[in-house]
Image: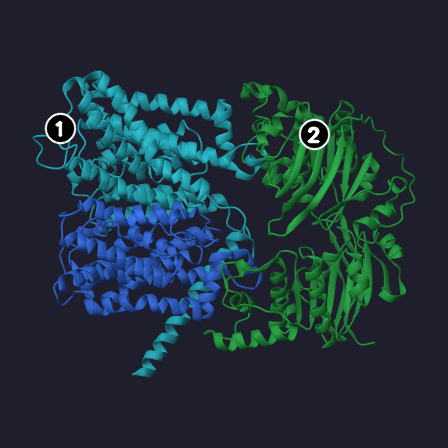
Chain colours: A cyan, B blue, C green
Amino acid sequence: MVRVFLLLAKLLIRCISSGRDFALKLYRAQRSGDLRKLFHATVLGLAGSILLVASLMVAGANPVSAISQLLTGSVGSASAISGTIREMTPLLILGVSVFLALKAGLFNIGAEGQFLVGSCFAAATMLAVGGPLGVVLGVLVGAISGGLWALPAGYIKAFRNGHEVITTIMLNNIAVNLTKWLVSGPFKGEKAVSATTATLPINSQLTPLIKIGQFELPQAVVVGILLTVGVGYWLTKTTSGYELRAAGANPTAAEFAGVKTKQVTVKAMFLSGSIAGIAGALQIAQFEHRFYDGSSVGYGFDALGVALLAGGNPYGLFASSFLFGALNKGGTSLMGLGIDKGITTMVLAIVIIIFAAIKYRQRGGQND
Amino acid sequence: MIDLIKQCITMSIPLVLIALAGFFSERGGVINIGLEGKTLLACFFAVAFSSRFGPGMGLCLTIVATSLVSLLHWLLTQVYRMDHIISGMAINLLAAGATSFFKFKFAPDGLDDAHSPPKMLLYALGIIAPALLWWLSHKTRFGLQHRSAGSDPDKARLLGINPQGIRFMGLIGTGVLCALAGSLLIAETPQFTDGMTSGRGYIALAALILGGWRPVNAGLACLLFGAASALQIQYNGQYIPSEAWKSLPYLVTLLAIAGFLGRNRTPAGLGKP
Amino acid sequence: MNLAVEMTQISKRYGDVQALDQVSLAVEKGTIHALVGENGAGKTTLMKALYGALIPDSGLIRLNGDRVTLKSSREAIAQGIGMVSQHYGIIGELTNLENLILGAENGPVLTPAQNEQRAQELAQQMGFEFDWSAESSTLSPAGGQKLEILKLLWRNSQIMILDEPTAMLSPQDSDALYASLKQLAASGTTIIVVTHRLPEVFEHCKRVTVVRGGCLIADHEVAEVGATQLAEEIVGGSVIERPTPVSSASGVTSLAVSDLEVKGDKGQVAVKGISFDLKAGQLVGIAGVDGNGQRELFHSIIGYAKPIAGSITLNGDSWIGASIGERIIAGLRVIPEDRHHEGVIEDWTLFENSSLGLQRLAEFSNIGAGQAELAPRMAEKFSTKHGGLNQKMGSLSGGNQQRFVAGRALEIYPKLILAFQPARGLDLNSTTKVYREIRRRCDEGATAVIVSFDLDELLDFCDRILVMNHGELYEPKPEEARDRTAIGRLMVGAA
């Protein structure tokens, strides 16, 4: 018995180590440049597509009808497009937030938490003040609270050498609990049964800017577009934007160039958080009209993908947020075919992996 | 009181396993935001395999499958040199999507007792794991080289150590421990539901950081977090709002990262190629 | 004579550069042998060949009389050769004992008690004291150097190569280190010390080999050679009569540094209380072998490193506490040492890089317009070869990046020009152009400080030369201010 066990263990170790040797060969081939960029883009793309089609077939769905349903559900009609734009709006604004931080060399995984805190306080402000003034103040409060929520991460990154990804993950979880507590206590609507605020009065709800039949263009998406253009301009045309990008691209060179990189880090984090907070406030004013526990369905995390896919160009955010919005909207319509919308999440994950494997690669290290 | 202790163990042992899974990758230099996704996949595998092949074989297959997912992470970060954070997030996303998509096909029902993973074995493993990993990390050649790869891969390379090879083994370790954690969660709630890990991957990561990337301390941090949630369940918001209890682990970790609770012990080579 | 190492006619070529040209080295077993030379003389290359870190193009290596080919460091280690390079190989997060055994463990399971016992024996044998369970991050530079030597003993090295072992040590620590090395040699270990410090050679070494420009220059018993002769052999007697560059220095002090002390990145005091005054219009060269505190001095004048004591003033304004940005506005322009990390952003275009460091100046108040106007002039200045200013900086060759960085530093009214090896990667023609432009700026009233490891370059272009050695600053006597050998002696501490 013992001998059989030992033999098995030996076999297992043999198996693992030959697997490792093969993998290391792959690693060396990759390092020595035998595998070129184009090659692994193709390989990854093919592998991803095969995986998706196989997944659909394994789950018993017809890939062709799934794809056509995905398309009609997201861009096939005026109402579908409106739905896609609605999904796209928070993703665009949050995308700007994450994009800005990324330019400063920061991964703001905390956009989710900043969005929640921003929308929660914005909703409370809009309800307390009411009317159009309430909306304006609400957006302002959303921006400030979102920015403040991001501030600890910026400070810890700059002055205490703690990774912003870890701190923002922690802040996200605290934000979920904080807002949940707020809407089940202090901010809870008077007649509300579940954890939610009251509904905004009609004069505090943003109406669509354009409405033609089934098609609606929300005001919030216009704000998002303006924000994108504004941030894009600021980053490329102003000295402070230039310094922020320098700090993100090469902190040592930026420091030598007289940029106070630590202050830039704190500032970038605050701004990024503010924009996420604005996204939250507009979500309330335009679409949700109230804040409730579970308001965000992971927009902040999707926004990271949106910003990454934009590939360094702020105007790329329009395309990437539209893609994500379409997948979210189309995914819901797949339910009609009995296909779980998990497949669209898989699509997003695979797109991000392929894109990041090509674009966001580490440099340095040595050959061995 | 007995209930409280029981509750505390139920809450903390899965965390211990996940945190130590994180130890295997992070102490060797691979940032692992993907613990949540790997554990979620492990839960899914545990239901899918155990319902077909029984608890023993099911556990083995879960371990193999989760390890393969973990090696995908190795492939992305070490071979494709992808950013560690993006790849971890992508794995979480992939796991959330895939498990949700496939659950009706492969894991539609709960497991009955005959197919449920071996609960007692898993708890026992969870209890001895911190000590075992401490031994592995401090008393073996693998452990020493593993730590050197996480602290300074370039210097380690100069001494003839291959950090990529070490991390390969480390990520297998991550896969195995995530598999155990996922199986344990399934042994407690025998039905797979979307997002059933409910942030445990992140809490475990917090515990790992709070424990200064040391196995025994990370285990103790998990115990602390487990006790906090057990107390919260027991006294359900009687004295302090339950949301405050739930935030506590994150808040404490935040302070720890800021260096207000002793010195920062982040491995210096974390995320370096 | 019992030779432990015999390297015969070793040659190595990198592209156009003949790094080693038929260099031979013979080292007697059980002795301390010094290998001396300037930066770039080929010392390190020769030692890398012995350590298997590079394969020479031609030549023979014999160890204890047997011919060997060393294709990798692993093979060299197996042959009993060990090397402590200047790049410190100790991992701070591990304990001293763990660092000692890392990479040379006895088996899959560690035996700490046994290991510690052997470590303790080795340490005692050398007269070292270590707290084995302490983390190595707490080690002093001297302690780190000692641990490195113990690492070689742990690996049973019979032949040890030490590259500038005393670079970061105080005189006392250096003496203690050499005492232990002598003891090792007495027990049969062969030690090769790469150094540029002549006092060490005379006090502690038995034989000395001099290399210069990749060639073997001389090989002496230390007892049979004098310091002056050795210094001359290292820097080489120059036959060219060079004209002293004409300076338009006024009597006005611009940069004044007094009692400046700066720490290096390993925590050692790298600049040891130096003082100097520079006049407006002066083009000053700081000579010295790499690693003698020039980098730290440079960084503290830029504002990148905070001095622990002393003052820096420009035109009477104190720069202690001034940010880098404020210094740039006051007229500081920098050609940094490491352009990849410190000088450019490789992902950016030449346009974008043209304002880096100057972005707060009036010329760039409209950043896009400023770039459009000035980037072409900066590229033009030293004929940077590029395929359009929209090209990424990273796609330029090193020399062209250097041309651009130099052009940028000299474009907008500099007051204080700081340059670290400004001619790095440039041909002779471009080098002359860069120095001429610096001179022109000095004639307009700027002050320039050039750190270079190439003494000839400094003699050719600078009107005043200061020397750094071991963190101290020396100025040659007025009558020897242009004397290559005299300056060379200061560089190697033989004056």
* Amino acid on which the number 2 mark rests in the picture: Leu
Left or right of residue C2, residue A344 in this image: left
Q: Mark 1 vs mark 2: tell me if same chain.
A: no
**A305 or C458: nearer the viewer:** C458
Q: Nearer the viewer, mark 1 or mark 2?
A: 2
State the image coordinates of residue C139 (x, y, percent, origin top left): 57, 60
- Residue at coordinates 59% horizontally, 77% vertically from top-left? C121
Residue B51 badge: none
> Please, which chain is the residue tagged with disc 2 on?
C
Left or right of residue A169, residue C254 in this image: right
**C457 or B63: nearer the viewer:** C457
How crowded pointer 1 is (Cα within 10 Å; few <14, some 14-19, many 20+) is rated as many
Residue B157 visible? The answer is yes
How crowded pointer 2 is (Cα within 10 Å; few <14, some 14-19, many 20+) is rated as many
**Distance between the alpha carbons at the discs numbered 1 and 2:** 65 Å
* Amino acid on which the number 1 mark rests in the picture: Ala
Left or right of residue C254, residue C212 in this image: right
Q: Which residue is mark 1?
A: A198
Q: Quadrant of the N terminus of chain B?
A: bottom left
Q: Secondary structure at mark 2?
A: strand
Residue C346 visible? The answer is no
State the image coordinates of residue C287 (x, y, percent, origin top left): 77, 43
